[in-house]
């Protein structure tokens, strides 16, 4: 059948990373049924949007515009009066795509998230409560609505960030223990994971450090999310929750007494390691890069608090994590993180040189300088807040190296 052939061509284009061309093939495949089977057209468009979504969210530089276009066409072909359940789910899928698309935008995020919230509210007005499917749809929409407010709060340009994050927390709290969620484990995970993320963000943005009330709420919710995801066998979600917990533990260590901080970092390292065990299975390369990045940072912090023997161990682990992270981060689309990786590798070599024999120290310092020079153009391009630190560390490495090389 010609439609099947077009679908196959779309799949081939999508697996090559060409979602725009894939969307064209999917649209043509759907149009073969135009005029006599509108429901089949909408089904093909909906499924195709889902294929693009799954591939793009695993890419280094995701773009959901083509998926949104297909989802909008599918919604237009769904009767809101005669096909209420299908229409509600079509609204949900479109809102989900708008929310994830907003993450990739610096200027259009507010419009995308505003449109997503409108779609969610319209769907919530029509969703029923009699069946298990109705309850599942209601929960999906509520979680997504909270996510939209949480996503909007994260943007620096949003002056009403506190209002948005508070709204997100209120939404999640209102449904966390709702009896309609008793049999929907995946939703319960997302709720508690998002509660954790929201409290963590609010604590950071509010200037709360250490083990304050917001941080404690975030930690408790993260632990509950880990428990639920493990019970439900949700490997992607379990890894995400482990990273959230690790980040909180690492942050708490920055304001804790030395002995407590050391143990908190050990717990953070264990959490990041657990997440990275899962990501090769889930193929989320960008999330893996961020987990490696966070592991590199906490190992570097741990090295500076360790004795000489353990310092070397943690420095080597930090270098390895940052090197792996820089390979998984795309330089063009994640220049900030990519440059930060090389800067921190340079710092690790610089620190190691301070306790090494002369020959090893010379080699360490040269490696440090090389890494600083790799990071420098990126820091200059993005006007990184660490630019002065990099220049100071690079100058220190050069001066120390010159002294060691003197006869």
Image (cartoon, rainbow, N blue to C red):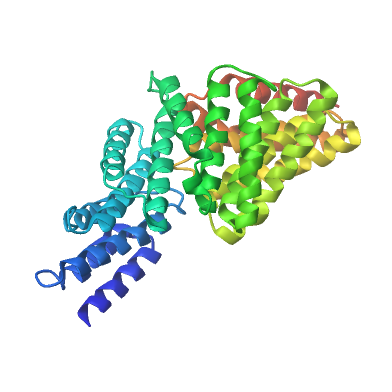
Q: Position of residue 281 (x, y in %)?
A: 60, 61
The x, y position of residue 124, in whole percent, is: 31, 43
Q: Residue at x 28, y 54 (%)?
A: 90
At horizontal 69% and vertical 21% (from top left) the residue drawn is: 210
In the drawing, does residue 55 fall left or right of residue 366?
Answer: left
- Is residue 191 among what the camera can see? yes
Instruction: Report the residue that reaches farthest toward the front.
Output: 130
| Vertical comparison of 63 with 299: above or below | below
Image coordinates for residue 298, horizontal then vertical, percent? 71, 34
When the figure is inspected, residue 52 is found, relative to residue 262, above or below; the finding is below
Does residue 388 appear left or right of residue 119 in this picture? right
Q: Dividing the picture into quarters, in which one does residue 306 lie?
A: top right
Residue lying furthest bottom in this view? 1
Looking at the rendering, in which quadrant would you find the C terminus? top right
Whether residue 313 sits left or right of residue 144 in the image: it is right
Q: Nearer the viewer, residue 134 or 146?
A: 134
Q: Is residue 329 visible?
A: no
> Hey, which quadrant is residue 269 in on the image?
top right
User: Going 70% across and 23% down the picture, which residue do you hit?
Assistant: 211
């Amino acid at each position: 059948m010609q439609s099947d052939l077009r679908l196959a061509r779309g799949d081939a284009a999508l697996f090559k990373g060409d979602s725009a061309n894939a969307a064209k093939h999917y649209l043509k495949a759907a149009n073969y049924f135009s005029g006599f089977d509108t429901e089949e057209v909408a089904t093909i468009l909906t499924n195709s949007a889902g294929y693009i979504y799954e591939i793009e969210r695993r890419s280094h530089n995701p773009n959901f515009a083509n998926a949104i276009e297909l989802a909008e066409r599918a919604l237009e072909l769904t009767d809101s009066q005669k096909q209420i359940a299908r229409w509600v789910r079509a609204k949900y899928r479109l809102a989900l795509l708008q929310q994830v698309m907003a993450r990739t935008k610096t200027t259009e995020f507010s419009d995308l998230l505003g449109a997503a919230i409108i779609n969610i509210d319209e769907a919530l007005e029509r969703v029923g409560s009699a069946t298990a499917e109705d309850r599942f749809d209601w929960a999906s929409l509520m979680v997504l609505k909270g996510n939209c407010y949480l996503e909007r709060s994260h943007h620096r340009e949003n002056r009403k960030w506190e209002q948005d994050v508070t709204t997100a927390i209120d939404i999640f709290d209102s449904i966390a223990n709702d009896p309609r969620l008793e049999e929907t484990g995946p939703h319960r995970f997302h709720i508690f994971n998002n509660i954790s993320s929201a409290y963590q963000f609010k604590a950071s943005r509010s200037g709360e450090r250490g083990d304050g009330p917001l941080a404690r709420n975030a930690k408790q919710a993260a632990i509950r999310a880990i428990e639920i995801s493990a019970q439900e066998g949700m490997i992607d979600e379990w890894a995400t929750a482990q990273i959230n917990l690790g980040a909180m533990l690492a942050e708490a260590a920055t304001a804790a007494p030395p002995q407590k901080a050391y143990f908190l970092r050990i717990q953070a390292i264990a959490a990041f390691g657990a997440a990275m065990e899962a990501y090769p299975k889930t193929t989320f390369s960008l999330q893996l890069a961020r987990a490696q990045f966070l592991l590199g940072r906490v190992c570097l912090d741990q090295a500076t608090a360790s004795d000489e023997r353990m310092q070397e161990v943690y420095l080597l682990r930090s270098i390895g994590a940052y090197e792996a992270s820089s390979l998984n981060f795309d330089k063009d689309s994640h220049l900030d993180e990519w440059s930060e990786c090389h800067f921190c590798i340079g710092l690790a070599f610089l620190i190691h040189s301070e306790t090494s024999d002369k020959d090893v120290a010379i080699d360490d310092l040269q490696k440090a300088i090389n890494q600083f020079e790799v990071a420098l153009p990126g820091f200059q391009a993005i006007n990184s807040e660490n630019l002065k630190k990099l220049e100071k560390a690079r100058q220190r490495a050069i001066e120390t190296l010159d002294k060691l090389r003197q006869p």
